[in-house]
Image (cartoon, rainbow, N blue to C red):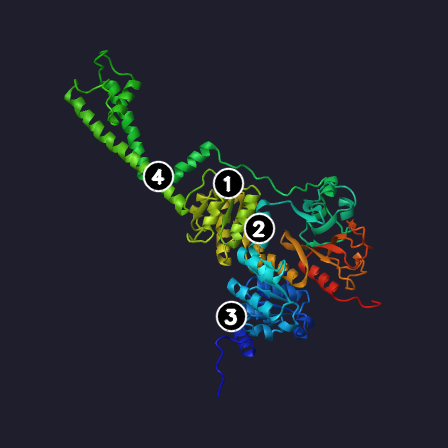
Amino acid sequence: MQSAVPLRPSVGPAWRVMWNSRCGNVGGNFGWHHGAVPAPPSDAATNWREGGHVIVCGLGGVGLRTVEALRSSGVAVVVVDDDPDLRLARVVEGWGVEHIARSAHLGDGLSEAGLDRAAAVVCAATDEILALETALRVRELRADVRIVVQMANPSVGRALERVSGPGGVLDVASLAAPSFVEACLRRPAHKLELGGVDFAVVQTEVAPDAVGNDTFRGHFGSLAPVAIMPADGAPMARCPGRDHPLGPGDRVAVLGTVAELQRAGIDHRTAAGIGPSSVGFFRQLGRRIAIASTTSSKALPLVVGGLVALLVVSTLVLHATYIDPSTGGHLSLLASLYFTVETVATVGFGDYSFAHHSAAMEIYAIVLILVGVTLVSTAFALFTNILVSRRIEQSLGRRRVPGMAGHVIVIGLGAVGISVVEGLLAEGRRVVVVERDDRNRYLSRARALGVPVVIADATQRQTHSMVNLADASAVAVLTSRDLTNIETGLAVRESLGERWDDVPVVLRVFDRNLAQMMERSFGFRHVRSTSALAAPWFVGAALGLDVLGTFYVDQQPFLVASLTVAPGGGLQGLAMEDLSARTRVIALSRSNPAGAFEHPPRRGTRFAGGDRAYLLGPYEELLRVLRRDQRPTVPGG
């Protein structure tokens, strides 16, 4: 009897042939590094059946980035996903990572992936109910395995953390949002608190007329170099030594305590100037008139103009022809205007009257009253319509903000968008949100925060006028679709014109290679991937590395983390100078009775079991340090 034909494609040779013929080699499209191609499969990746591996359940977004991070760090990994994006599955298979097309939340895929021998399970399904079910299933099947779960719902997350353990439930939006906030604020520094001591990473530039040694040490003394960006466009040097050469115009990111930076004369403040908070009165008035002329009845300017013309003409006519019975003379211009207004308004105080004048004057009075009442009534009706329309527009999210300046425009109100809005508000910034979907689940939350929300298409120039893009200090484009973000970013660039170089436009893009090409071709300087920002936290939680923060220098992400040196592990007895050249040990909290906090540790300083080490560097380097610590020390090695 023949077996049933599977509903979903397998990951076997036939699937390979089909995708090779259709798509070619797409594996490089998701590289984490700039221009990097994933390394050939390592023994760690292919020998996951020996145990100690990590199971990643769910291949979308964070799942793919987590696999890539584990893979590049030499960690054995296997993927379980019964309904993957075929392109992503093709990429993972190209890396030599086995993909099991079985269900994780039902348990059969977990068993096939070797749950009984695994070191950790990462539940990264984009559907949170599947991630929840998978995490609970893992805990039922094995009580001692480390679990990391992607979960945005705070209530469910708190309950799940009691099952998965502290630090096991992570929200991608809250992890990625600080990087978007920093880019919008153009912060010159990134603050760190390590062991109760305040540190900061500050970007500065070597002055063209700087004198002294031509090395980092000669310019910055005992401060630690995080990155050096040469003025000639050469590649960035990550965590170089203090004797690395420097030249005029080179940009550097330096690390030190707040006190050390102050002594070196480096500004460690974390926020750039916010600029003006409002538009001048006359400029704002002009904008409001322009808005009224475009959004309300275009008849209003004509009616108002006709009314003004009627008043002027009638004032001149009465001044020239009306004889005041009480004085026998002509009315003054002011009295003529007064008589015209009371006639048009039909108030008739009795001080002036057409009753004892010629028939021509009485006919003129009839025409004046009829035309005047018509124009006044129409003007009031149109003006009332403006007020009502503005109230309706505000309630429907179609309001305008012509009087705001120095604000940040957030486009896209998803989980990441609302987290960025809250982060900007916490920094004291004014925010305007643009969202296309009037049924968005976060609209009420944004309005409760007092944030103006405009329901409109952010690719349209009219929308840019509505949110006063011309006076904005930053724009964050954060929808969940790459193409929409790119289209919106290009439209914003066109609207900004000459201000393009002065206003940071931060784009959320999933594909790292696409982000690099956009930077090179279109001049975007702040392109971020939420998955790339969050993946180190997931990997660190899975492997036991305590991630403390992430930040960018140019387009290179850096990780700040801590680990406790395992007694008998691979780091015990190791000197600082024997670590990777691209890993910076910021400080050590000693495990001895004195509990000394050593900063900066000397090159010859050695790790001891139980020490808490604070590390900085590219994420893959820190993961290698962690892996090295998890290997036991070889006697005599």
- The disc labelled 4 sits on which kind of residue? Ile
Q: Are marks 3 and 2 in contact (CB under 8 Å)?
A: no
List the residue tagged with mark 3: 83
Residue 122's x, y, as percent?
Answer: 60, 65
The furthest residue to the bottom: 1
The CA span between labels 2 and 1 is 20 Å
> Helix or strand or loop: what does disc 4 sit on?
helix
The label nearer to you, 4 versus 1, is 4
The furthest residue to the top: 327
Closer to us: 420 or 562: 562
List the residue tagged with mark 2: 180
- The disc labelled 2 sits on which kind of residue? Phe
Q: Quadrant of residue 619?
A: bottom right
> Helix or strand or loop: what does disc 3 sit on?
loop
List the residue tagged with mark 4: 386
- Rendered view: 50 above or below 371: below
Closer to us: 14 or 630: 630
